Image: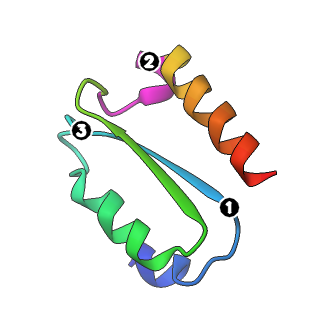
């Protein structure tokens, strides 16, 4: 399982997740958050499965904010 592979990963990681993703439930973000110590999670009820395509400005802003926190 993915969470086993990522458990304890120290790399700063941004998790972008769409709450309305019908393929992979948003609860997956909670699982990843629980095993990755240096992560930030950004989910959005309006965001669909491809946040970088469907909401590029929001996704870019989330990344820029994350990058500034991680540096």
Q: Which mark is residue 30?
A: none
Compute the Cα span from label 2 to label 3.
Answer: 14 Å
Q: Nearer the viewer, residue 68 or 50?
A: 68
- Write the start and end of the magenta stretch as one range: 48-55
Q: Secondary structure at mark 3?
A: loop
26 vs 54, left or right, is: left
Q: Residue furthest front?
A: 69
Q: Nearer the viewer, residue 67 or 21?
A: 67
Image point 64% across, 36% down: which residue? Answer: 65
Of labels 2 and 1, earlier in sequence is: 1
Q: Which residue in the protein does label 2 denote?
A: 55
Other residues around mark 2 within 10 Å, as few (<14) / some (14–19) / many (≥20): few
The residue mark sitting in front, 3 or 1, is 1
User: Residue 8: image x %, image y %?
Assistant: 58, 84
Q: Quadrant of residue 1?
A: bottom left
51 vs 57, left or right, is: left
Q: Which mark is residue 21?
A: 3
User: Residue 20: image x %, image y %?
Assistant: 19, 34
User: Residue 24: image x %, image y %?
Assistant: 25, 50
Of labels 3 and 1, earlier in sequence is: 1
**From the viewer's perspective, is residue 42 above or below residue 49?**
below
Q: Which mark is residue 12?
A: 1
**From the viewer's perspective, is residue 35 above or below residue 44?**
below
Compute the Cα span from label 3 to label 1.
Answer: 24 Å
C-beta proximity under 8 Å, tags 3 and 1:
no
Q: Nearer the viewer, residue 26 or 69?
A: 69
User: Is residue 36 rendered magenta in the image?
Assistant: no
Of labels 2 and 3, earlier in sequence is: 3
């Amino acid at each position: 399982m993915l969470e086993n592979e990522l458990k304890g990963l120290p790399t700063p990681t941004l998790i972008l997740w769409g709450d309305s993703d019908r393929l992979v439930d948003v609860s997956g973000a909670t699982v990843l958050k629980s095993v990755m110590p240096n992560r930030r999670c950004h989910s959005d009820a309006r965001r669909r499965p491809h946040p970088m395509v469907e909401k590029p400005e929001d996704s870019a802003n989330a990344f820029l904010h994350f990058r500034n926190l991680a540096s």
